[in-house]
Image: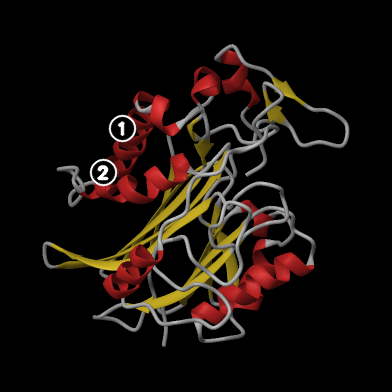
């Protein structure tokens, strides 16, 4: 996430926590990067704060052929890694749910860390989730943002984008997002964008109606009040009166032509088109390897931002 300010560092997690998380999530050791369900504090590569600068992992459904893999790589910017993710399958009321998310933070990592812990919990505990998932997702996004703002003394003045995907019994896929982290589905080899990039220029009217402005300085991207490069985000208390946090939502049926889903932060999408990403991911049946290849290609194309990527493969 691009923000004109300097972020702060948060102390790292200890090795004992790392081992516990590995056991809890059944992770396999990776020789190149830390592998776990959550982004945690020990690894081969480290940023200046002492946290891991790369992580990767994989998992699978217990009921269907669906597999997933993820790769997170710290960007070249001079601040600690600010991306968090979720990738797991859970059993709820006799249903299997695949929960996948990328949270791209700015001005520190406290807000994406809060989202990682709380957003899906808030969605699933809503009483309407099983009858109207879309409504529950909207309510949970807004409830979670209000909670973040109420905890602002502890969470700081930073914020985060979010793209979330809920796979229900491998039949329905609910995708929601705020900001510019993106979800792309591959059907019969064709890339289908499942999220909307919330950029200041495209939502200028909403920003100005709320009393803000959009800057367009030469050589820079459009920014809300000259600061934030997205028009919707969690947190950002100092800009919240000019921002939105309600998500755009799309629903897709999983059919025989549905091959894979890619969730990624803008560190990937700044340098790669949707179809290019799908073409790369389709070359390998191993979703973890596909996620790593996407992150590597983004680095080769000189992406400067943190790069986080999840690949979900629906077919064996």
Q: Position of residue 116 (x, y in %)?
A: 38, 51
Q: Which mark is residue 122?
A: 2
The C terminus sits in image quarter = bottom left
Q: Which mark is residue 130?
A: none
Kindly give the residue lying farthest to the right in the view shown: 218
Q: Position of residue 80 (x, y in %)?
A: 60, 50
Q: Is residue 72 visible?
A: no
Identity of the residue drawn at 29% across and 75% down: 23
In the image: residue 248, left or right of residue 151 = right
Q: Position of residue 266 (x, y in %)?
A: 63, 52
In the image: residue 111, left or right of residue 207 = left
Q: Quadrant of residue 201?
A: top right
Identity of the residue drawn at 64% across and 71% down: 294
Instruction: Tell which of 135 and 242 is nearer to you.
Output: 242
Identity of the residue drawn at 61% across and 29% down: 203
The residue indicated by pointer 1 is 143
């Amino acid at each position: 996430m691009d923000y004109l300010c300097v972020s702060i560092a948060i102390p790292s997690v200890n090795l004992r926590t790392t081992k516990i998380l590995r056991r809890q999530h059944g992770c396999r050791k990776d020789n190149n990067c830390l592998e776990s369900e959550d982004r945690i504090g020990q690894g081969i590569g480290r940023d200046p704060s002492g946290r891991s600068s790369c992580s990767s992992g994989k998992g699978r459904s217990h009921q269907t052929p669906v597999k997933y893999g993820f790769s997170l790589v710290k960007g070249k910017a001079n601040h600690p890694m600010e991306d968090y993710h979720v990738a797991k399958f859970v059993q709820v009321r006799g249903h299997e749910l695949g929960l996948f998310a990328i949270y791209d933070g700015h001005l520190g990592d406290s807000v994406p860390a809060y989202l990682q812990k709380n957003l899906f919990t808030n969605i699933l505990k809503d009483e309407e989730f099983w009858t109207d998932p879309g409504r529950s997702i909207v309510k949970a996004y807004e409830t979670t943002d209000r909670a973040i703002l109420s905890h602002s003394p502890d969470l700081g003045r930073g914020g985060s984008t979010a793209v979330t995907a809920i796979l229900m019994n491998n039949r329905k896929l609910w995708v929601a997002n705020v900001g510019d982290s993106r979800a792309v589905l591959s059907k019969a080899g064709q890339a289908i964008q499942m999220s909307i990039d919330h950029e200041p220029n495209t939502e200028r009217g909403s920003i100005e109606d709320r009393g803000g402005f959009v800057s367009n300085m030469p050589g820079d991207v459009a920014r809300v009040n000259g600061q934030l490069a997205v028009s919707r985000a969690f947190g950002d208390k100092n800009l919240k009166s000019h921002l939105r946090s309600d998500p755009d939502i799309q629903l897709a049926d999983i059919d025989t032509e549905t091959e894979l889903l890619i969730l990624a932060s803008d560190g990937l999408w700044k340098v790669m088109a949707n179809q290019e990403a799908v073409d790369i991911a389709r070359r390998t049946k191993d979703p973890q390897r596909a996620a790593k290849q996407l992150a590597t290609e983004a680095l080769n194309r000189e992406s400067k931002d943190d790069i986080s990527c999840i690949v979900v493969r629906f077919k064996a």
